[in-house]
Amino acid sequence: MDSARDAFDAPTPAAPRDLLDASTDAAAIVSADGVVVGWTRGAEALLGRPASQVVGRSAAELVAMDRDPARVAGVAARCRAGMGWSGVISVRHRDGRPVDVDLRVSASFRVGDDECFLLSAREQSEQWTLGQSVLDGFLTRSPVGMAVMDLELRYVWLNDTLERFGGVPREQRLGRRLSELLPGLQAVAIEGLMGKVLETGAPVTDYEYLGWSWADPHRRHAYSTSFFPLVGDDDSVTGVCYMVQDVTERWHARRLLSLVNEAGTRVGTTLDVMRTAQELADFAVPGFADFVIVDLLEPVLSTEGHGAWLTDAGPAPARPVMRRAGMCSVREGCPEAVAGIGDRVDFLPPPHDANLLIDGEPILIPVLDPSDDLWTTEQPERAVSIREFGLHSLISVPMRARNTALGLATFVRSLNPVSFRSDDVLLARELVARAALCVDNARRYTREHTAAVTLQRSLLPHALAGGTALELASSYLPADPTDGVGGDWFDVIPLSGARVGLVVGDVVGHGIAAAATMGRLRTAVQTLADMEMPPDELLAHLDDLVLRLSGERTDDTGAQQGATAFLGATCLYAVYDPVTRRCTMARAGHPPPVVVAPDGRVSFPEPPAGPPLGLGGMAFEATEIELAENSLIGLYTDGLVEGADRDIEEGMSRLGEVLARSDADLATLCTSAVRQLVPVPQPDDIALLLARTHALGADHVVSWEVPVDPAAVADIRARATRQVEAWGLGELAMTSELIVSELVTNAVRYATPPIRLRLILDARLTCEVSDASSTAPRLRHARITDEGGRGLFLVAQLAHRWGARYTADGKIIWAEQEIP
């Protein structure tokens, strides 16, 4: 029996004594040369053989097993050393049947001059026989490897499973240490644990480790091992037993989960397509592969169009155009690569075409053969690289996300001698799936961000027109791309009478919605400014508009109706008059402007703050200040003066210091101020508008009081004509005479005195007629039979533009002419 042979193979410590009475056990005395010299009645009852038939004969005749002198000699040697032996053997009954008995052999002793051994045996009961069979099966055929080590950590017994795990035959293990047999299997650490168990008597459970074995030298396995002491009759530790289980599949599953979770934190840290592709390559080397390349379809890297292939859009071109977006190697500089980052590539593992990217499964090539005709024909450069650097195993995984083909990720091994297996394909698929989702998110964000930036820049003024009244410069700094495009804007609006409107605003929120809303507000401000509204009234109308936009909530299904629905905005609007050098301003929840006087003094005139736009129900107030010529006035958004490292008051103080320190060119001053105040990207857009004021001298402005008498019109008309000619604008003398005649005549006929005519020479020639009435002028189209009603129509035809504005004292009708 195998169990009996194993028992002879591995002498074991004596088993604990039976609790039942042993007086009926069979006993015999055997001499050193194997002759029976004593036989008891218990032995006679067990085997049915009287003493007369046994004493003096060889004990080997009683054994119903194959004879093995070497093993018998081993048992004898053990007993001569003072240690007993116990085990299960089969003996022969008188009637010829075998009887399985528990046999115990005592230490040797002397009977006279002869060396003898005492043997005692008890027949195994039917219940014990069944239990032993189950035990034999458990020990020898269990999926758990088992072994017994002696006090010197040498093998004294092992089961078949452990023999199969290690690949080392049982005969070579017995009597030798683990470190002598499997030096690469963390043998030193394992023997250290077994020594600790022998020393402390405390078991060690579920110790996991990785290693190779002779049974499977090309694949690393994971094992879980437990150690516990063997205790003898006197409670002394006589050895250590260990059990080992191959948990490679469990380890791979846990590793897969761990790597995928780790990839979630290390891949896709930014909304940048190229950066995400490189993070995937960096993550997979060297833990998973020795060389990784990530190639993305060219449209994925484009900010125009859809940006990728839809996987259900039909067959793709045979050789897709891709660009190398990321790569990493265990070798410095990625010498295996035949293309660099950003280069155009068309790599697909032969014989596959672009349909692999659309509906193909991952490709596993366990063994790369550079001499394969497909590689040498379709990928000759890569075949050379495979041969030169020993690339021996490959996995290629299509990158797809949200029904969109993005590219291809390829993993290659060279220094790692283990080829890729099917379970590695699962890991590669999971890694690429996560990276593909991040790439698609980055692609979509990049397209949206580019569209928002394009929209925003298209809505900002491309040229600033301040006429002779203002010298202008502006600077706009977009927010950090990861925070999205903001809604900051500024504008310069030429007004009548050589005046200039300055506006700066900030829409709440980010993205295309904020940019689009900014465009709507900018357009509204231009329209309201053209209607000659004073700053406080303009903000009141703008507030109503924002309330309407904010009301675009949701429809019955809960979907947003207006893509530009938002919560509110801030705004500051100022009007500078170069004739009076006065600036009128009002603000809606916006920071006050900064003013730097010609002598360098800095101030922050604060018109009443007013509520942010969109709250409604609160009034706005205007403030008027006088600006000396060559004063500097700055309008800005809060991103310039407010940040995580400073509050808004500190930022305003620094802005004043920066603008007061330099008398450099205005554009240079504007750019350097933004750079000094905001040296690193911020989560908010930044806008700064600087204006240096100029005044119109008395030689550019003339005015006359107009008597309320139709006869005075001719004199006023003549004076105006002479002034226009004096300014050297003879070409405009006739049209100016007609415009003045019509406007003054209408005022004398219909308006309330006092009436005044003013001519302003600036970028344009302006004629203004003011009166004390608030009646709005109306442009009529007179019929052929009408005797009048053509005055304003004529003015509209002769002037570049015309209009009316209201003042605290009445109104002003004005008309502008382009200067040739």
Image: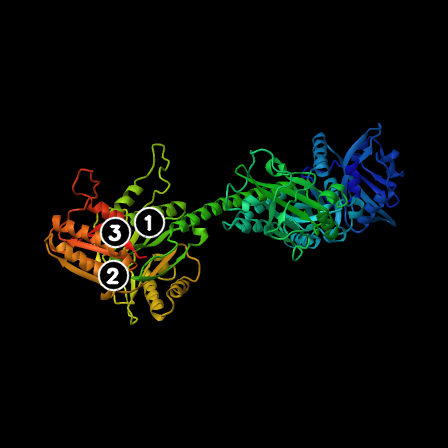
Give how far apart the Cα atoms at labels 1 and 2 are: 39 Å
Q: Nearer the viewer, residue 416 or 36?
A: 416
* Marks 3, 2: nearer the viewer: 2
Disc nearer the start of the sequence (1/2): 1
| Quadrant that contains the C terminus | bottom left
* Residue 220 disc label: none
* Residue 522 disc label: 1
* Marks 1, 3: nearer the viewer: 1
Relative to 557, is 704 above or below? Answer: below
Q: Which residue carries the number 3 mark?
A: 611
Mark 3 residue element: loop
Q: How is the image coloured?
A: rainbow
What's the residue at 55%, 44% (across, down)?
A: 299
Q: Position of residue 280 (x, y in %)?
A: 58, 49
Give how far apart the Cα atoms at labels 3 and 2 are: 50 Å
Give how far apart the Cα atoms at labels 1 and 3 are: 19 Å
Q: Which of 203 and 579 is in front in this view?
A: 579
Q: In this view, does 719 lie to the left or right of 249?
A: left
Q: Position of residue 209 (x, y in %)?
A: 65, 49
Are the residues at dot 1 and dot 2 in contact (C-beta closer than 8 Å)? no
Rendered image quadrant of residue 649: bottom left
Q: Is residue 780 left or right of residue 102?
A: left
Q: Which residue carries the number 2 mark?
A: 725
What's the residue at 72%, 40% (across, down)?
A: 161
Name the amino acid type tagged 3. Pro
Q: Which of 156 and 376 is in front in this view?
A: 376
Name the amino acid type tagged 1. Arg
Disc nearer the start of the sequence (3/2): 3
Mark 2 residue element: helix
Are the residues at dot 1 and dot 3 in contact (C-beta closer than 8 Å)? no
